Image (cartoon, rainbow, N blue to C red):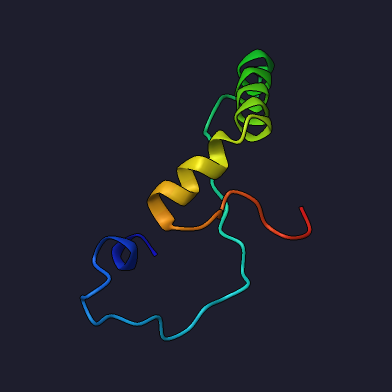
Amino acid sequence: MDYIKNKPDAGVKIAATSDEVSRTAFLIRSDDKDLQEAINDALKKLEDEGVLKEISEKYFGKDISTQAGE
């Protein structure tokens, strides 16, 4: 989506899409609950303030920050 957004005249078309969700994770020590909570709180704040949506729309041309069913 980023390539097509930035080069709309490139003649590239999406051949197929998938409803499969791509996940991203942060690697932290399992005993570092404070860091885990801080990361989760920061991500929730970014989501609540619409920042994740803004980033998605800026780089992908649409909101990919949330997935149906989550």
Image location of residue 67, percent across then percent down:
67, 57
Which residue: 57% across, 52% down? 23
Which residue: 63% across, 18% down? 38
Image location of residue 9, percent across then percent down:
22, 75
Q: Residue at the far bottom: name it.
A: 15
Q: Residue at the far right: name it.
A: 69
Residue 25 seen by the camera: no
Image location of residue 2, percent across then percent down:
35, 59
In this picture, is 20 found above or below 68?
below
Q: Left of 28 or right of it: where is 31?
A: right
Position of the N terminus by quadrant:
bottom left
Which residue: 57% across, 76% down? 18
In this picture, is 21 found above or below 13?
above
- Could you say which quadrant of the image residue 22 lies in? bottom right
Instruction: Name the residue nearer the viewer: 29 or 34.
Output: 34
Q: Residue at the far left: name it.
A: 10
Q: Left of 13 or right of it: where is 46?
A: right
Q: Residue at the far front: name it.
A: 9
Image location of residue 8, percent across then percent down:
27, 71
In this picture, is 55 found above or below 3?
above
